[in-house]
Amino acid sequence: MADALAAAGTAMFDDVLMAQKLPSDVVQRFNECLISGAPTPEEDQKVIADAMFAWARELGAVDFAHWFFPLRGGGGAVGGMLGAFKRDTLIDLDFKSAYVTKPMKACLPHERLFQGETDGSSFPNGGLRVTHSAAAFTTWDRSSPPFVMDKCLYIPCAFVTHFGKCIDEKTPLLRSMDAVKLYGLRLLKALGIGTDAQTMHSYLGWEQEFFVISADHFKARPDLVNCGRTLFGTLPTRHQQGDLNYFQPIPGKVQELLDTVQAEMLKIGCPMAVKHNEVAPGQHEMSPVFRTANVSCDSNVCFMEVMNREAAKLGLQVLFHEKPFAGINGSGKHANWSVGTDTGFNFFYPGKTEDGAKLYVTAIACLAYGLAQYNEMVRCTVAHAGNDHRLGAQEAPPAIISLYPGQGFEAFVESICAGGDLLGYKAEKKKQETGCSAAMHIEANVEDRNRTAPFPFCGNRFEFRAVGSSQNCCLPIMVCNAVMSAGMAHLAGLVEGGMSHRDAVAQVFKENKHVIFTGNGYSAEWPVEAAKRGLPNLNTTPKAVANWNTEKNKQLFDTLKIYTAEETEARQEVMYENYISCLCCEVETMVQMTEKGILPACAQDLDRFKGMDKLAGSRKTTYEAIADQLEKLKAVYLAKPTALADEATYLCDKVKPEMVALRAAVDKAEAMMDSRVFLGVGAEMGPHWG
Ligand code: ADP
Ligand code: MG
């Protein structure tokens, strides 16, 4: 790996490269503008574009592309929620030349680096752009460095309409990062802690789970190709019993894929930190070193793109869907998130100083406020068809959003509420003996892990565990930032109004501690207890999405300048549309596979048993049950209503059960069918075993 490490960051135009390639005053102004939000002066734009152009050419770039994340919905996609771009040439005509046939020249005009224009109506936009008023613009997210990949200079961008309305995932995230800055600094000022901070950042480190299977197997399955998950198929007799696959050696070909992708990601400035086998066969995970939230969201999308590309070269297929195979674990994307100052104050690190300790307690109070007051909003960010197979299914957190700050901390909250001091929480690591002389004692973390919680504390960050594997992280992290900002504004307001710091924290905990839960989130008792506490259990996407555009949510987004009311509405429309198109595609694929493959296979199989009723056993009735259930599914599907919310609810409540029944009927048949026949129709083949 020596070469790969040596190439670290060489294909990314980051701060280090800027310092090398640009005059220091240009760099300084550029960074000042990032903090103030002011436009980069035009003269500086020219200098930056020229330097970036020269650098990109050295790396062999022939094109450039504004790269952005259209509102393509929640998740459940085969290859993940990928970015959008159109490659533009770095060649232009020299119109200043005296020649009539204007000579060509390679260049990157500054206005093309900073802004692009395209058609916004062909991307999902929730009604914010229609065919007859379609213009939309890409504009460089100056806080995310461009990079060169595949001979193309990628410029990470925000995507907004002619009127500046966001129709992408990135813009609201960037706005939420501004909110964290505004309200975080306000809170620090109110508390008189860390007041030398100039700005605040939010950070993300994602843990990406995925399956890798053979590309040939993938292509033989219309359900995988169309929907990213198997719609039929019994469990193989060996699957994930005993969790033997977890952390096992990575199969050779997959190892080659992961190594290649790691090296590629490193070049473009994303150091992958971890790669390992996951619990289910064919399932793996990779995660990078955390970065500022927008840069990390960018690199996650890039990761999915690079994985797809490199897998294809090796005859492999990556499945980013949340639940590719029924009966074995699905995939998530834990989003490790924190907020902190430019001076190094991490709000979620208990710290060694008194100020650090007080800030930590205060920050958790803010987060508890945000999660309690805007519980449904947080739930919506992980609501989509793919995740409905996962959340609450004993392998992912429940659909109930709660906060796990640790059991010790929970007790400490009680002491604060009872009048105790803010400094009582002991954040020291705990020494535990191993009981043998060869292996030294361990330093256990302050708090144990809780993998059943949607929001567990992880030592210096919170881990939002409910995010789906195929999702873009922007929306969940945007909402983490939003609810945190709401909490920081609220608490700052109390202190500014004259309340003591201690009393303000105590009051916020008193009013919101019902969101804190440190028990077993997978237990049957928790939903009952959650209901008593008034915490919603929105266990399907349509139920969650119906709660997105409440007055309370619209008001918060508007106050924080993250979404206008219109943008909030648009986002809901996209969530519904995405859910509906996903479900419809699944139903139609199921119907086609049954009619064109499964029923003919049943007929063929029965034919072999002609005149041998005893040997045929229950085959006839089992196979006929498929035909009956298929007709039932078709009839129910045909009767679906058309209004968005009604359609989504109907698909969820009425159609999905019929899909489950059809799968059960087919899977029963598969288990008794001549293997030469069922392999012919491409039934469950199990993931790639290495
Ligand atoms: P786990 O042990 O939970 O599986 P991993 O090591 O796989 O954790 O991933 C943890 C992720 O959290 C990494 O991407 C890591 O860089 C990130 N991370 C660490 N500290 C922070 C922080 N303060 N803020 C955000 N992310 C962080
Ligand atoms: Mg992990």
Image (tube, helix red, strand yellow):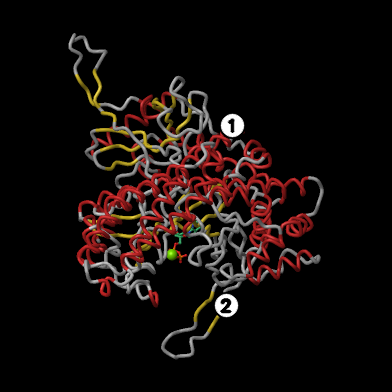
Q: Position of residue 629 (x, y in %)?
A: 41, 55
Q: Foreground: 78 or 609?
A: 609
Q: Mark 2, residues whose alpha carbon is within 10 Å: few (<14), some, or many (≥20)?
A: few
The secondary structure type at the circle numbered 2 is strand
In the displayed structure, 158 sits above or below 282; it is above
Asked whether residue 272 appears in the rendered view, the answer is: no
Task: Give residue 546's position: percent from left, percent from top.
Answer: 60, 44
Q: Amino acid at mark 2?
A: Lys
Residue 430: assigned label: 2
In the picture of the structure, the residue carrying the numbered disc 1 is 566
Residue visible at 42% across and 39% down? Answer: 69
Specify the label residue 432 is tagged with.
none
Mark 1 secondary-structure assignment: helix
Residue 21 visible somewhere in the drawing: yes
Residue 628 percent coordinates (x, y) = 39, 55
Quadrant location of the N terminus in the rendered image? bottom left
Residue 151 locus on image (x, y percent) = 24, 39
Of discs 2 and 1, which sits in the foreground?
1
Seen in the picture, residue 33 relative to 665 is either above or below; the reply is above
- 203 sits to left or right of 278: right
Q: Residues within 10 Å of mark 1 (few under 14, many from 20)?
A: some
Q: Quadrant of residue 86?
A: top left
Q: Amino acid at mark 1?
A: Glu
Where is 378 relative to 172, above or below?
A: below
Which label's residue is closer to the chain start, 2 or 1? 2
Task: State which image quarter holds ligand 2.
Answer: bottom left
Label 2, label 1: how far apart the Cα atoms are = 50 Å
Q: At 20% across and 52% down in the image, what residue appears? A: 313
